[in-house]
Image (cartoon, rainbow, N blue to C red):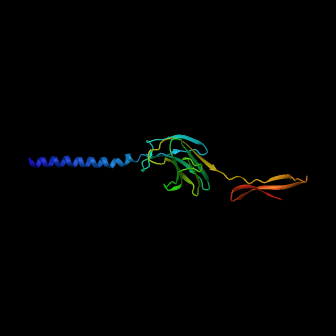
């Protein structure tokens, strides 16, 4: 009789273990569903959105919201993030998760963020919106602008001098240490 109880216990244990292993084997299949879905970001248009506690935890007590954008080699981008509700931080991340550029406070002295970056590798990038500190959330506006170089222009200028004579000159854009200016050539 004792032998029968041991066999029944052994069979119950064996079937339970096999059932558990079969169940565990199926878990990775269900776990492969994609949970991370950054929001597609159209370029040259403004997005009005909201950062909440339902967004991505940063591990620093706050939350982040990610936007996916395709950029080309040589692109120069300006990313502007404004919020009246929280102190914003903007990040541009490469496909491998490395930080390409980051900005906390913009040049205007506010807590808004403005980031400039030159893209050296084509591909998918992530624009990450997050708040400085642990409790930041609220409405924000986000805009990515692709900056394009200005085409070279040459102007013919007719200058009338004080003595009544006229003089034709050529004006063309040149770069100085203070930015682009118009230079005149005689």
Picture coordinates of residue 61 (x, y %)? 42, 48
35 to the left or right of 111: left
Q: Is residue 53 above or below residue 155?
A: above
Picture coordinates of residue 140 (x, y %)? 53, 42
Residue visible at 32% across and 49% down in the picture? 25
Picture coordinates of residue 179 (x, y %)? 69, 56
Residue visible at 51% across and 41% down in the picture? 85
90 to the left or right of 145: left
37 to the left or right of 24: right
Residue visible at 53% across and 44% down in the picture? 40
Q: How many marks?
A: 0
Q: Quadrant of the C terminus?
A: bottom right
Residue 140 versus residue 124: which sits nearer the camera?
A: 140
Residue visible at 60% across and 43% down in the picture? 45
Residue 123 versus residue 179: which sits nearer the camera?
A: 179
Is residue 2 at least partly visible in the picture?
yes
Is residue 127 at least partly visible in the picture?
no
Name the outermost residue toward the right: 164
């Amino acid at each position: 009789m004792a032998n029968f109880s041991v066999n029944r216990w052994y069979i119950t244990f064996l079937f339970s273990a096999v059932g558990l292993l079969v169940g565990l084997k199926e878990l990775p299949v269900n776990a492969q569903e994609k949970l991370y879905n950054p929001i597609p970001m159209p370029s040259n248009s403004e997005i009005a959105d909201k950062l909440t506690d339902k967004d991505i935890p940063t591990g620093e007590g706050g939350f982040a919201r990610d936007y996916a954008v395709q950029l080309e080699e040589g692109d120069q981008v300006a990313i502007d993030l404004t919020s009246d509700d929280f102190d914003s931080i903007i990040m541009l991340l490469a496909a491998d998760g490395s930080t390409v550029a980051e900005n906390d406070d913009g040049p205007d002295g506010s807590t808004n963020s403005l980031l400039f970056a030159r893209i050296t590798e084509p591909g998918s990038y992530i624009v990450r919106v997050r708040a400085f500190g642990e409790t930041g959330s609220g409405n924000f506006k986000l805009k990515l602008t692709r900056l394009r170089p200005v085409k070279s222009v040459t102007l013919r200028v007719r200058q009338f001098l004080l003595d009544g004579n006229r003089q034709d000159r050529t004006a063309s854009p040149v770069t100085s240490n203070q930015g682009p200016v118009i230079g005149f050539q005689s």
